[in-house]
Structures are given as C-alpha cells and as structure tokens.
Amino acid sequence: MIKNKKLQEIDLSLNSLVVFRKLMTQEVILPLRGLLDTETMDPVIQLRLYTEFISRLYTQSTNLTEYIFRLICEDENFYITAKARGDEVDPLLESCVENELAILQRLARLRPHELQREVSYYGVLPEWKTSDINFYEAYMERVRNIGKYGYGKFARHAMFVLREGRCVPVLHPDPIRMDDLIGYEAERSAVRENTLALLSGKPAQNVLLSGDAGTGKSSTVKALVNEYFSEGLRLIQITKEQLTQLPELTEQIYDNPLKFILFIDDLSFSADDNSFGTLKATLEGTVTARAKNAVIYATSNRRQIVRERYSDRTGDDRYRHDTVQEIGSVAARFGLRINFSEPDLPDYLALVSAIAQQRGLDMDDDLLAAEAERFAEGVGGRSPRAAKQLVEQLLIQQQISCPEVTT
C-alpha cells in the first residue's frame, strides 16, 4: 500500500509520543497503526486490519474522536500526576503535551474515506464518526479542574472495589439517586452535609450509619456518590476482611485530587475478631498522616457493631469483656454517628403511601394501608425496604390482573 502524505506524516509523528506513549498500545489503536505503518501490504492483510480496527472501535464507540479523547483523559502519565499534586511543571513539558495533543487530534479526526481508499477492496466497508473537539483546550480545562474530573481509572468510574490490593471499577453500579429515597430526611441531610464538607476541602468526619436493616443506610451512601460524581466524589468499597489493607489503600489515594469515601458495608465484629485493630488505628490516625481527601463511611445493623453470642461467653470472661469493650470503642471513634431506626406504624404507612405515589401505584388509601400492615407482619418488620417491596409486588399484581390491551 502506497500511503498518501497525510497518513505518512501521522504515522511518523505517532512515533514521537512521549507523555501519551502508552496510548499506542491500546487495542483499538494497534490495528489502526498497522494500517498507517506499512508502505506495501497484501490486500487481505489490509482488509483484516481495517475490519479489526472497526470491530474493536465499535465495542467502545462509533466516534473515533470521542474515543481517543477519552483515552487521553483516562491516561495516567507523569505529566497529569505532577499537575494533580500541584507540582511546578517545566515549560518544556507543557510544550511537549501541547504538541502531542495536536498529533493525537490529527489521528482522531481521520475520516473513513481517507483509509478506505488505501485498502484494495471494492465492497462496502464500515465507517465511523468524528467530532470537532479541540484536544488541547478540552484537556487543559480538565487539568485546571482536575479535582472534579480526576485522571486514570478514576476519571470514568464512580465506584470501585478492592481486589488483590488494586481498585477495580464497578462497571454496573447501583444507579440510585437521592431523589429516589424517601424518608429519613434529617439523617440523610447530616450525611450529605458531611460529604459536602469533604468535597469543599473542609474537615469531614468518618461516619457510622447504624440501625435497623432495610432502612436505606447503604443506599444513602451510594446515592450521594452518584449525586456528586461530577464534583469529584468516588467510592471504594472494602470488606471487613480487607481492613488490613486500609493503610496501603490510603497511601495509594493520598495525593489524588479527587475525594473518596472508603465504604465498609454491614460492619460487625465478634468478640474474638482482631481485624478491628486496623480500623481503630485508621480512625485514630497512625504514623501515616490521615488522607485529607478520604473519609470512612461504615454501615452496621448493630448500634455497637459488636456481635456476641451466648456461646461466646466461655473461657476467660475478663479477657472477653476487655475485648468487647475495645471493639465497642471503635464506634466511638466515628466522628459522626447516625441512627436509622425502623419507623413506627404511622411513619411506615406514610412511607408506603409516598413510594406508591412515586411509582404510580393507583390504590385506595385504606386498602393500601391494610396491605402494608399485612406485608410488614409477613416479612417481620417495617422498613423502607419492606415498603418498596410491597409497592413493587402490588404493581406486578395490577399488571397481571389488568394487562394492557394491544391492537
């Protein structure tokens, strides 16, 4: 294949990348570079590279410009990490970044016909879209507001889990929003205010959300992250078994410009559990300085987060008493402790009515109240979760008994 001058220049310039060099190993870019890189090529190889490029691109986007700019924004390189730390960057490096963004913009604006005419094939070839994005201006805007946009894997995803010491994005997180939650306004307002303090760089407290099951403690935390993702809020969920990794995790995110909730769901300890020591040390502060960009939010269905069975009361009772006291003291080290109590009957009925209205359930108020009491007795308690389950069940029953008539 004899390349035209424009393709030849793009191919040559891509070899000069320094800051964004890792982008050239991305799976979509590799076959594209293969098309640009060869002066003469078998027609079958040409066609395979072209279709492989399109096939990989389509799994990510149909717009080449937007896809490449997303790669740039998610790239973790020495320039963006220096800017995130607030370091002074040499003008030589600034100039290098500007030049490389111009190179990548040329690549990203390649149009289908420019490559198709270089492929010796007379059938119909798939195409892609391009956009008029000024890479330098858009990227610099993100750099100036890096505390909201972030970089690397944290630029795109809101929620993460810890696996083998690494933060792995949750690809399909719970999309719940604050507007979806009904009741507990005072409790949620307190958590929101603490979260806003974190986002604004003010001192924020570690938070323990305790109380009855099904009252929306975990939903509150996830909804806040969804609500303030664009303001730079991220969540990393860790299990009780991963508490020993807390110091290392804190070190990993210490210089990150984003704000993090380290989320421990359904936290509880038994009297012979030693993992509480790491959590206690993290809450108190150890040799490592506490990260100003992170707080711990934990939920527990037990107000004292201590689980002790009658069978536990054997052996050295004095030692066990001291251990239980020490575990219980962990709760006292959360600066903000919020209790989500199961609602009484009037509040529960009001909650059911509000959820029914939100979901569009059309039912007589007295009948709905009777169904709510019966359902609460069946599931063994009144809670927002029970109220939501009831409304969903009644909606399904209505759909079954009154199916829509289609013509």
Image: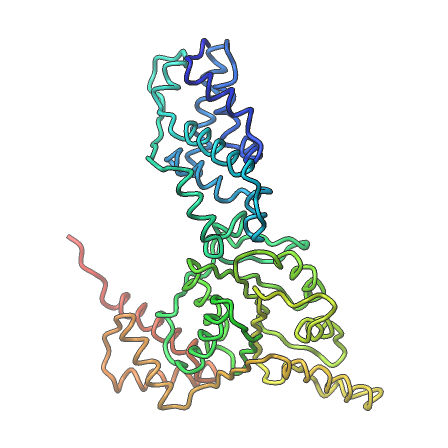
How many numbered discs? 0
Please, which colouring scheme is shown? Answer: rainbow
In the foreground, 400 or 260: 260
Location of residue 267 by image quarter:
bottom right
Q: Position of residue 190 (x, y in %)?
A: 46, 79
Q: Position of residue 304 (x, y in %)?
A: 63, 85
Relative to residue 25, is residue 407 drawn left or right?
left
Quadrant of residue 390 within the rendered picture: bottom left
Is 380 on the left-hand or right-hand side of 313? left
What residue lies at 52% left-to-right and 18% top-to-bottom? Answer: 37
| Figure quadrant of residue 372 | bottom left
Q: Is residue 157 above or below residue 296?
A: above
The residue closer to the viewer here, 342 or 158, is 158
Residue drawn 52% across and 82% down?
Answer: 338
- Which one is in front, 191 or 314? 191
Where 90 sits versus 43, above or below? below
Residue at the front extreme, as displayed: 91
Spot occupied by residue 317 in the image (x, y as percentages of width and height): 81, 90
Q: Is residue 195 above or below residue 170?
A: below
Which residue is situated farthest in the left direction here? 407
Residue drawn at (35%, 70%), measured in percent from left and top? 179
Place of residue 287 in the rendered image (x, y in percent of width and height, measured from the top left): 74, 68
**In the rendered image of this protein, does residue 172 appear above or below residue 130?**
below
Tell which of 125 and 117 is nearer to you.
Answer: 117
Q: Is residue 128 left or right of residue 148?
A: left
